[in-house]
Amino acid sequence: MAAAEQLDDEALVERMSHVSVDHDSKAFYLGWLERELRLNRCADCARWHHPPRPMCPACWSWNVEPTPVRGRGTVHLRMLLHQGPPAPGVDYTQGPHPVVVVELEEQPGLRYTSTIVGCSAAEVRIGMPVELTWIERHGAPFPVFQPAGRG
Ligand SMILES: [Zn+2]
């Protein structure tokens, strides 16, 4: 199989049909296929931003580079969904589905939202250290968090 980097636009959109791939998010989703969380970082002022935009929101430079983050951070916000959109592996009848907003260690205010695995929803605490891990959804890698030090 060809490396994800070699997927052309049409193949990427087909492989990732469960998300909305566009020019600005293309590198981000190619990263998922390589199990790398790539967020945009400005090559001029070094600020990170997410979701992906073509221009740095800090200095207005167009010189932004999709750059892998280490995936470590702390829980900034926790939500427990008792109902929501259907997703593979998510069963709202089995208890609330946890969603966490994680502040990544790369930069204050740089946050990424996903679910958390490897602990019960009730165990999730604000400020809890977490790290990135990957599950499969729709036949493709999907970035989630787990309590730090368990992977
Ligand atoms: Zn900048």
Image: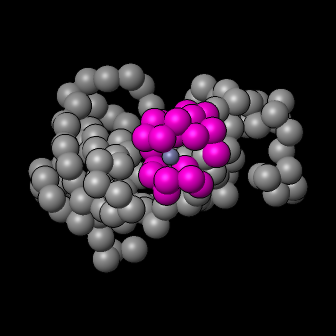
Instruction: Give above or below for 17 relative to 146.
Output: above
The percent position of residue 97, horizontal first and vertical second, equals: 26, 38
Q: Quadrant of the C terminus?
A: bottom left
The magenta stretch is 42-63
Q: Main secondary structure of the magenta part?
A: loop
108 or 151: nearer the eye? 108
Q: Residue at x 61, y 46 (%)?
A: 64
> Is residue 50 part of the magenta span, yes or no?
yes
The percent position of residue 44, horizontal first and vertical second, equals: 56, 53
Q: How many marks?
A: 0
Instruction: Give above or below for 53 relative to 128.
Output: above
Q: Quick check: can you spot residue 19?
A: yes
Q: Is residue 93 left or right of residue 45?
A: left
Q: Residue at x 19, y 43 (%)?
A: 78
Q: Residue at x 23, y 66 (%)?
A: 129
127 or 49: nearer the eye? 49
Instruction: Give above or below for 125 relative to 26.
Output: below
Q: Quick check: can you spot residue 17?
A: no
Q: Which picture quadrant has residue 14?
A: top right
Instruction: Give above or below for 119 relative to 54.
Output: below
Q: Is residue 130 left or right of residue 68?
A: left
Q: Is residue 18 left or right of residue 115?
A: right
